[in-house]
Amino acid sequence: MADTADSDFDYESLLDRARANIPEGISNRARWTLPTPEIMIEGQNTILRNFQDVVSHMERDENHVFQYIQNELGTSGSRDGPRARFKGRIPPKRIRRAIGSYVTAFIKCHQCGAPDTHFQKQDRTTLLKCQACGATRPVKLKL
Ligand SMILES: [Zn+2]
């Protein structure tokens, strides 16, 4: 009879096996996270206190990220050292969502979900190329 106590075929070992198949550097990047956005209201403005810190983890152009967040929030803002300031009292949830949608649009591989990607120019198109699985997809950088 088949042995049903297949204890070494559990979820954890499946994960280990999956990890064993990808190079070290990439599996480290798979645990990539962004710093928690520190958001506060100051008068009629909303401050993202650690904007620069968050962006430095993204390895993307600061101005591109900043412009994108302004568009998503439908407001204007200004940079203030490591901080970003947006006009209006914006619920923190909306700022977190704007950052999240930037990640989805310009960082995450849509094939495997890895954040280890970079832009690649091909003719007049910009592609987002994944280092982990090699997938590419076109991205529109113009905001
Ligand atoms: Zn990928």
Image (cartoon, rainbow, N blue to C red):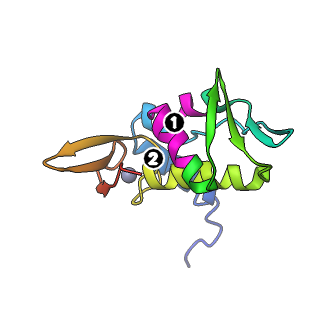
* Residue under pointer 2: 107
Name the residue located 61 percent from the left edge and 27 percent from the top edge. 52
Along the horizontal axis of the image, is 55 left or right of 45? left
Q: Quadrant of residue 38?
A: top right
Q: Marks 1 and 2, Cα distance to the nearest angstrom? A: 8 Å
Asked if the residues shown at circle 1 and circle 2 are in contact, with their CB atoms under 8 angstroms apart, the answer is yes
Q: Quadrant of residue 140?
A: bottom left
In magenta, the rendered stretch is 54-69
> In the structure shown, which secondary structural element does the residue marked by tag 1 occupy?
helix
Magenta stretch secondary structure, dominant: helix
Name the residue located 48 percent from the left edge and 45 percent from the top edge. 19
Residue 26's disc is none
Along the horizontal axis of the image, is 50 left or right of 14? right
List x then y, in percent, for residue 123.
Answer: 13, 48
Q: Image height check: is 11 above or below 121? A: below
Q: Nearer the viewer, residue 74 or 107?
A: 74
Q: Where's the N terminus, which quadrant?
A: bottom right
* Residue under pointer 1: 58
